[in-house]
Image: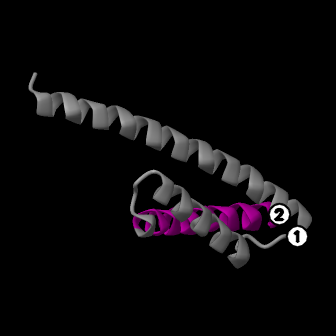
Amino acid sequence: MTELDNLRQEIDAIDEVVVAQLARRFAVVRKVAAYKGKHGIPAVLPERIDVVKSRCAALAATQDLDPELVRALYDLIIKAACRLEEEIIEADAA
């Protein structure tokens, strides 16, 4: 196996962890949606979204990552989470 193959295997292993953590995050999102639905809280809370994106961008900077890249990734993650929350809240209300 070449050095490049070894590095690719390392990246593959990291990707597995990233996807597992993303699944864990969405499991919590499902719980948040159930709570919000039960308490009449809207799925989308713009102020919370801004806090999460800013916090993660700042964390990125401490890890030598491009904060704008992380902000863009979280934009996608949060949009998907909000869609999921809305679906769960609507289903529970029906």
Q: Classify the position of the N terminus by image quarter.
A: top left
Q: Quadrant of residue 93?
A: bottom right
Where is residue 89? Give x, y as percent: 76, 64
Badge 2 vs badge 1, beta-carbon distance below 8 Å: yes
Q: Callout 2: 10 Å neighbours few (<14), some, many (20+)? A: many
Task: Give the residue at the far right of this rendering.
Answer: 39
Where is residue 61? Give x, y as percent: 47, 59
Left or right, 80 with reference to 65: right
Amino acid type of the residue that numbered disc 2 sits on in the rendered structure: Gly
Q: Callout 1: 10 Å neighbours few (<14), some, many (20+)? A: few
For the residues labelled 2 and 1, the Cα–Cα distance comes to 5 Å
Look at 70% across and 52% down and name the residue there: 30
Q: Is residue 41 magenta?
A: no
Which segment did they paint magenta? Answer: 69-94
Disc 1 element: loop
Figure label count: 2
Pick the residue in front: 56 or 46: 56
Look at 45% across and 42% down and name the residue there: 18
Disc 2 element: helix
The chosen color scheme is one colour
Examine the rendering and report whether any part of residue 70 can be seen: yes
Q: Is residue 11 above or below residue 87?
A: above
Look at 58% across and 67% down and name the residue there: 53
- Residue indicated by mark 2: 37
Residue 40 - label: 1
Residue 27 - label: none
